[in-house]
Image (cartoon, rainbow, N blue to C red):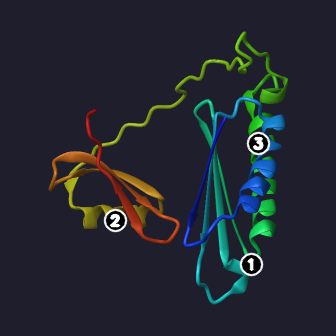
Amino acid sequence: MELQITGKKTELTPTVRQFIERKLGKLGRHLPNITEYKVEISEEKTKSPQQHFVVQVTLDSNGTLLRGVERGKDLLTTINKVAAVMNRQIEHYKGKLYEKGRGSSFARSEFDEEGEAAQPPRNVVKVKRFAVKPMSVAEAVDQMELLGHDFFLFFNADSEELNLLYRRRDGNYGLIEPELG
């Protein structure tokens, strides 16, 4: 298990690092196959003192990413809050039904020789087809807004490639331009 702790605009003391290690180490009891933790702590100058510290935790469990973000006025309290959020996400992930009709969950699934959960095969159950016409990014934004979706796949007339437009949490837009790798 790899633990990466980074601080933006704040200095992390050894006491804070130990506190983070202790709090997040407890998550491994609930989900033993966590391979990596990333903790990012930033201190922001906000009008509200309740949002002074931002703690973001991302953990990788064999390719499944779980992420939690919390804000608060005290760093240690914020770390406690984000640890509780991650705990809830792990419980939700473990209890997620993989076989709808049988009611088996991750928590009750069988494990293979390496201690990893044996997951049932996942199938594509629906295929959608739609015609894409060449358009600019501005036209794609308008189309996405008209449809009321959070993402929109379109053929970019400028680059002559399929692009994916999506709405970010801050209200702005993001554009994904695929590359063959």
Which residue in the protein does label 3 denote?
90
Report crowding for label 2: few under 14, some 14 to 19, many 20 or more residues within 10 A (C-alpha): some
Residue that lies at the very extreme toward the front in this rendered image: 14
Report crowding for label 1: few under 14, some 14 to 19, many 20 or more residues within 10 A (C-alpha): some
Q: Nearer the viewer, residue 140 or 6?
A: 6
Which residue in the protein does label 2 denote?
141
Q: Quadrant of the N terminus?
A: top right
Kind of residue at badge 2 = Val
Identify the mark nearer the N-term, 3 or 2: 3
Report how far apart the C-alphas of labels 3 and 2 lie in the structure.
Answer: 35 Å
Q: In the figure, 121 relative to 21: above or below?
A: above
Q: In the figure, 9 relative to 176: above or below?
A: below
Residue 157 coordinates in the image, percent (x, y): 16, 54
Report how far apart the C-alphas of labels 1 and 2 lie in the structure.
Answer: 37 Å
Which residue in the protein does label 1 denote?
73
* Local SS, label 1: loop
Front disc: 3 or 2? 3
With 38 as the anchor, is 105 left or right in this view? right
Identify the mark nearer the N-term, 1 or 3: 1
With 84 as the anchor, is 41 left or right in this view? left
Q: Quadrant of the C terminus?
A: top left
Kind of residue at badge 1 = Lys
* Local SS, label 2: helix
Residue 128 coordinates in the image, percent (x, y): 43, 37
Residue 165 coordinates in the image, percent (x, y): 36, 56
Tell me the residue at 74%/18% (across/down). Answer: 115
